[in-house]
Image (spheres, rainbow, N blue to C red):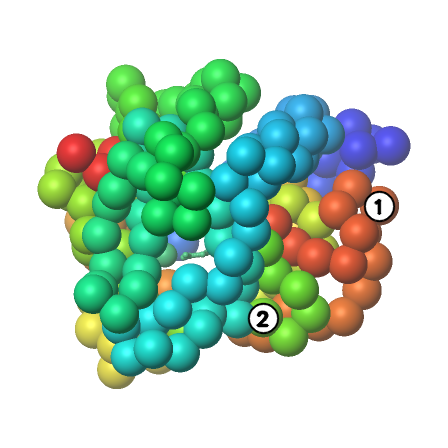
Amino acid sequence: MQQAASDLFADDPATPSVLPLGAQALLLRGFALAQAAELIQAVRQVAHQAPWRHMLTPGGKPMSVATTGCGPLSWITDRRGYRYVAQDPLTQLPWPAMPPAFAALASAAALRAGFAAFAPDACLINRYAPGARMSLHQDRDEQDLAAPIVSVSLGLPAVFLWGGATRAERAQRVPLQHGDVLVWGGVDRLRFHGVLPVAPGEHPATGACRINLTLRRAL
Ligand code: SIN
Ligand code: FE2
């Protein structure tokens, strides 16, 4: 059934399976569909070791998304600011290893978007319950801005905000479905982006939530 959905998209000229969002930014519709069940199972295993939590912004407000992470490094925020760390501050243990399926998918998606040899060392995992959102921001805590960002959508749909190089620029609204993958890098690496509040719903793969994997090269 999932395969049928991606075939449908591919055949419909109104919904091309690859949608350019910028000179070096692409939406790859359904790119992760075939691996989605495996990815979600791996997310459950990661969250078993590194529990979901609502991290605090530097201003002290809990984020609406619940977060975990995996890889040699993962991104955190707390009152001391934004940074990458090797240990989960909740458990004091190293982050769970990056599941091979995450790294393989990220590298294949990056290659499809023109970025060869992408080897992520960090995966941030965000869980959006209905109402959770991500305000406009740039991903700029990484040392190596030459590497792209690969962002995988699982479960409930969402509307992605794809902004410009400045916060003031009007953001485009891009609907994201289960299995969609976004890749942005190069001249588009510092584009502002965010996610509108997720609408209530149930998805067969995840239940009442959306899960986003953001794969990055931090160092
Ligand atoms: C993010 O930019 O941190 C999340 C993007 C998404 O959930 O699609
Ligand atoms: Fe981001």
Q: Quadrant of the N terminus?
A: top right
Question: Which residue is labeled 1 in the image?
Answer: 204
- Pointer 1: residues within 10 angstroms few (<14), some, or many (20+)? few
Q: Secondary structure at mark 2?
A: loop
Instruction: Reply above or below: 53 against 181.
Output: below
Q: Residue at x 28, y 18 (%)?
A: 117
Ligand 1, what quadrant? bottom left
How many numbered circles are shown? Answer: 2
Label whose residue precedes the other's in the sequence (2 or 1): 2
Q: Is mark 1 within 8 Å of ligand 1?
A: no
Instruction: Reply above or below: 171 against 21.
Output: below
Instruction: Reply above or below: 108 against 45.
Output: above
Question: Which residue is labeled 2 in the image?
Answer: 132
In percent of width and height, residue 112 lies at: 41, 27
In percent of width and height, residue 57 lies at: 33, 71
Q: What's the amino acid at mark 2?
A: Ala
Q: Quadrant of residue 197?
A: bottom right
